[in-house]
Amino acid sequence: MILKKTILLLLFSSISVSVGCYLNTKPKKNPAEKMQDFIINISDYTRKINPNFIIIPQNGAELAFENGKTDKKLDQKFLEAIDGFGIEELFYNGELKPDTYRIDLLSKIKESETIIVSEFVKDTALVKDSYERNEKSGFLCFTRTEENYHYTLIPTKVHNENKNNVEKLSDIKNFLYIINNSNYYSKSAFITALKNTNYDLIFIDLYHNGVQFNKEEIEKLKIKKNGGKRLVVGYMNIGAAEKYRTYWRRDWKINNPKWLKKPYKDYDQEIWVEYWNSEWQDIIYGNDNSYAKKIVDTGFDGVYLDNVEAYYFLYND
């Protein structure tokens, strides 16, 4: 009888431990949630250094919703970590092709976030319509034409030119997206070209031909030609590793290190990464040698986070 009681007690204890472990196990996060965490952590890190630092993810509008699922409520914690959304090819992708799925998502987000859209038109006659469609929807727009597909040119005409000072993202009336500065033979030539514009917001890379901008150079860009203040935001790719960056090592390739996961279609110099991997995240933020720290230290007003939609492309396409 004593033996039976002992066996029953041991069995009950085993079941209790198993059930307890099961109840205490947190459900695994899906890829979109991992990207949400990544962006929130970048925001927390940079804003501890500069409380007014601007965070703008590009694309990935699903991240604005809980668990990255668009049938759920807006994710307030994520929205508090960012200042706006950058979106590419919303109404125009060469020709008029309104993306009704993303337009609907952004209409739910625009009350709390500034939506900035980069359109692409093949026919210059469509530029005006692209601006009008975005403005009607409550979005800001920068439209590039075929010769500017890779963001290499500075259009001379500024749509909705604004003389006022710009202190925060919600103040902007227009913006310039020029992350490829290869058309400019020197940093000084590039800086001079940018200074002679009246754009409220400029997106540029941290480097010119592999040479990092310094704080003094970035400060020069924060004044528009008309004398008003503007914002200067640095580009940072957080979903794909770029082979031409200073962090890249010669022996790296797909699966070496293991977080280099998948070729980036049509972009030979980039590889999709397992962005939740601690080694990759250390490259991006959290230490004095990280990419985000360099952007903050160089005096940028914020950071533009590219390829946040890696949560989709790692598993599709």
Image (cartoon, rainbow, N blue to C red):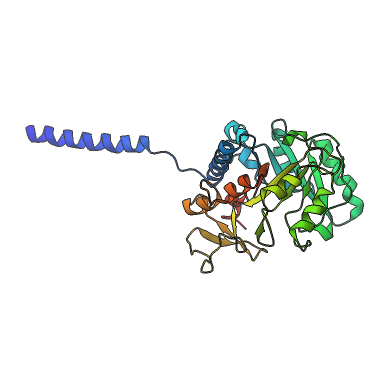
Name the residue rendered at 65%, 62% in the picture. 265
Left or right, 130 with respect to 269, comes to right
Left or right, 114 with respect to 11, comes to right
- Image quadrant where residue 5 sits: top left
Name the residue rendered at 8%, 36% in the picture. 3
Residue 117 x/y as whole percent: 76, 45
The answer to whether residue 8 is above or below residue 257 is above
Name the residue rendered at 62%, 34% in the picture. 79
Q: Residue lying farthest front? A: 216
User: Is 80 in front, or is 185?
Assistant: 185
The answer to whether residue 253 is above or below residue 313 is below
Name the residue rendered at 87%, 45% in the picture. 158
Residue 316 x/y as whole percent: 60, 56
Residue 56 x/y as whole percent: 67, 42
**Can the viewer see residue 26 in this picture?**
yes
On-image quarter of the C terminus: bottom right
Left or right, 92 with respect to 217, comes to right
Residue 59 x/y as whole percent: 68, 46
User: Is 67 in front, or is 12?
Assistant: 67
